[in-house]
Amino acid sequence: MNLETAAHPEGLRRVAIDPISRVEGHGKVTLLLDEEDHIQQARLHIVEFRGFEKFIQGRPYWEVPVMVQRLCGICPVSHHLAASKALDQIVGAHQLTPTAEKLRRLMHYGQILQSHALHFFHLSSPDLLFGFDSEVAKRNIVGVAAAYPEVARQGVLLRKYGQEVIRHTAGKRIHGTGSVPGGVNKNLALAERDALLKDIYQIIGWSLEAVHMARALFEQNLEQYNAFGRFRTHTLSLIRADGAMDLYHGGLRARAAGNNGDGKTIFDHVDYNHYWEHILEEVKPWSYMKFPFLRALGPEAGWYRVGPLTRVTQCDFIPTPLAERERQAFLAFDGGRVTGATLAYHWARMIEMLHAAEAIKELLHDADLQGDELVVAEKDRGERQDRGIGMIEAPRGTLIHHYRVDENDQVIRANLIVATTHNNQAMNEAVRQVARQYLDGRKLTEGLLNHIEVAIRAFDPCLSCATHALGKMPLQVALLDAEGQEIDRMLRGACSAGVPARSGPWL
Amino acid sequence: MNQAGETPALLIIGIGNPSRGDDALGPLLIERLEALQLPDVELLTDFQLQVEYVLDLRGRREVVFVDASLDAPAPFTFAPVVALEDASYSSHELSPGAVLHVYHKLFGEPPPAFVLALRGEAFELGEGLSEAASAHLEAALDFIAQRFSDTCP
């Protein structure tokens, strides 16, 4: 039984986890249970935002890299850079200057570092350090700060360092304007470089410790972590031409579901400017969010997973030494079984954080960052185009921005496919696996329901539209009976609502 | 840092999304305050508070969080906020009280802090500031400029 749709939903008891805590945005899980508490259906629903096209249409294209940052308070830099890459194509800037490309990369690795630090130390470490069904009052960052003050302190400082990289490269702490169509609008001054260099070796050291902490947690709970929410899936990510992990640019690589990371390649080094020849999206009547799939395999068999676990396992190597050493250890651990474990996302995420720290260090030693050629000169540009596609590996996975502009330089169409959309089916599969493993046939408790959330949280889904006004969001977990009557309720953490992710049929 | 290289005594953080109607009240207030060039004051804006803001609180004499609110009576409220272990710990977005609580756990007693909550009405993406919120912004600007001109030497 696949648990996506109950054979006979009538008369089943419905449990809703609404909204899910410690994920960005608004998600909801519904479970249908029979009289003996056996799970008959489990679904992750995303309350999806649908106003993006209206928001962006009619604006001049050069405003877009700044405007799209207002879709998300968590990964605005990813949208800033993906939009800039798409608009590079509009202005005919197909090869950036070395200064521009390296500045953007530095900004991106700062974003990866701060985002991964926030997720691991703040959002996930409470579950991992205290246990999935530990005392709920302690299962948060304050509990970590009290029990593991040095871990909490390092988490805060890692996050802060990534934000400082963004501030120096984007020009501002938020709503930065550093990246523009065709390049960047500032270089990195020597004083800024020196300020970042001062702490980078400490940051690398803490990142390495974080990898070891993630590994130790996995080792201590080996059987549980290996089995928890485990499922077989195809994988998708950008990859550099030589097979290296590259989070800023590359071609698309997809691999088939295999055993222990040995899946066969479905396609490799595909130019993402024609992504729709390889990726399509399916609509399901019970969800606002679409379900992407690999076109060659069809909607039933072609769904896939993106993000840190995919990137670490399907690249040929990581081009920084410490992260590559840790990747090799990760792949060899327990005969490779870890590569298919949902909870291995955390370990892989920390390997990427280490890679980001190393990449920042290398870039800071590159004199091109102080160069003066910030944008591609007019003489070096190709023809202006009316379509631009930008793709980047955001902290949570592959991010696609796709725009059409008219002859007046106004955006007439916009489409985003964000990492959380790519992972829609994969997250649903993880939820169903955990429901089978832990909830089926048992009386539900907060601790058991948190197991579902632990599985979703591993993907670090981001559904933000960055609104948050005080008192705006109702936050609750509601337990409903078969007639839909509420029989219990509890408060959850605050979160934002909506998701900027919808694609249209146009190309 | 101020010109002497010291951390300014007062920190005002405007919270909100400039492209979400009245959610822009916090950032807009900061924008208006920047023009006043108040001495010994640092001004910051962000979409939402996160754990790293505990580092910005260090060395301050006073901190003010400015945010739009659906609950505050018009035009605004100004009230002290204390360290508070609320449900926002489990999200990507911390409340001002939660930031103070993390500060307390990591660094000890936080500086005195206040929340300036401006009444907002509409928060749709792409919308501008509502007429009512514009009036609330002016009232809050007068209040905070007066307060800081009283506070600053």
Image (cartoon, coloured by chain):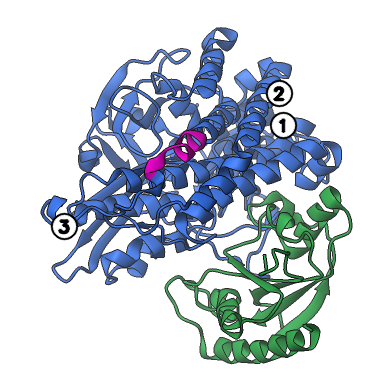
Chain colours: A blue, B green
Q: Residue A214: horizontal and vertical position, in percent? A: 66, 26
In the image, residue B33 above or below residue A459 = below
Q: Nearer the viewer, mark 2 or mark 3?
A: 3
Do the residues under discs 1 and 2 have CB atoms within 8 angstroms? yes
Residues packed near mark 1 inside 10 Å, few (<14), some (14 to 19) or many (20 plus): many
Frontmost residue, B151 versus A36: B151
Write down the residue under mark 1. A128
For the C terminus of chain B, the image quarter is bottom right
Secondary structure that dominates the magenta span: helix
Answer yes or no: are tags 1 and 2 on the same subunit.
yes
The chain ID associated with circle 2 is A
Q: Residue B63: horizontal and vertical position, in percent? A: 76, 70
Estimate the spatial distance between the alpha carbons at disc 1 and disc 2, rounded to whole Å.
7 Å
Query: Which region of the structure is painted magenta?
Result: A359-368
Answer yes or no: are tags 2 and 3 on the same subunit.
yes
Q: Nearer the viewer, mark 1 or mark 3?
A: 3
Q: Label 2 sits on what residue type? A: Leu
The chain ID associated with circle 1 is A
Q: Earlier in the sequence, mark 2 or mark 3?
A: 2
Write down the residue under mark 2. A217
Frontmost residue, A53 versus A477: A53
| Residue under the point 40% across and 22% down | A314
